[in-house]
Amino acid sequence: MLIVGPPGAGKGTQAKLIAATFGIPAISTGDIFRDNIKNGTELGKQVQSIVSTGAYVPDSLTNEIVRDRLLQDDAVSGFLLDGYPRTTEQVAELERILDESGASLDAVVLLVADTDEVVQRLLKRAVDQGREDDTEDVIRHRQDVYNEQTEPVIALYRERGLVAEVDGLGSVDDVAARVTSALRDRGIAPRPADAV
Ligand code: ADP
């Protein structure tokens, strides 16, 4: 599964809950980049200035990281990707990876939240977490990049009938309940063995 939506819609929070419910790993490209930056790795050094301005890391680099991650053992029986694919080229790469492993996407959860709300949330997160890309200018840039590059990705998955749209406003628990019910409506329910 994928979880998509504008920056600040709550993807990371919901991704962790969905992943726990289904017993699959939540894989966040943003978290992978931030961990590498924090640990001063070669990759971290390469992407630090890009991430801090809110631009997208080049597809070639992002694709390689996701490919490696999806080939790890814990992702064999399913995964939830958060923050990928964000460009149509990344969509094509994900398709290649899935084809090679004989897998296919079950659903794309789209978290919807309006711009004013997400900007407010991100400004609050700036205070709580001190994320370097949560300043007002960078937040606006991230929204623009999302509208230009990632909206077309969502349109593509919508055409394929994979999108489960969920209102992202309200408490974490309310949104989580909506996600579960939207997935259930699409015939996707946790098996007893998945629940943790
Ligand atoms: P948010 O959804 O709040 O923007 P993320 O944690 O998903 O935050 O991403 C943070 C940053 O990491 C992005 O602004 C971008 O610089 C980089 N990034 C994450 N995922 C991708 C991706 N799939 N392609 C390119 N860059 C990415």
Image (cartoon, rainbow, N blue to C red):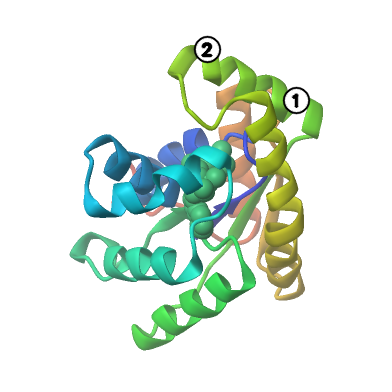
Query: How far across and how far down the image is residue 99, in percent?
Result: 43, 86
Which residue matches tag 1?
Answer: 117
Residue toward you, 51 or 175: 51
* Picture quadrant of residue 141: top right
Closer to the chain start, of discs 2 and 1, is 1
Give the SS element for disc 1: helix
Dot 1 amino acid type: Glu
Tell me if 178 is positioned left or right of 127 in this view: right
At 31% from the left and 48% from the top, the residue drawn is 45
The crowd level at tag 2 (other Cα within 10 Å; few <14, some 14-19, many 20+) is few
Residue 139 higher or lower than 185, as above or below: above
Dot 2 amino acid type: Val
At 37% from the left and 64% from the top, the residue drawn is 66
The crowd level at tag 1 (other Cα within 10 Å; few <14, some 14-19, many 20+) is few
Q: Residue furthest top?
A: 127
Q: Ligand 1 within 8 A of label 2's CB?
A: no
Which callout, 2 or 1, points to the residue nearer the camera? 2
Residue 74 higher or lower than 167, as above or below: below
Query: How far across and how far down the image is residue 40, in percent?
Result: 23, 41
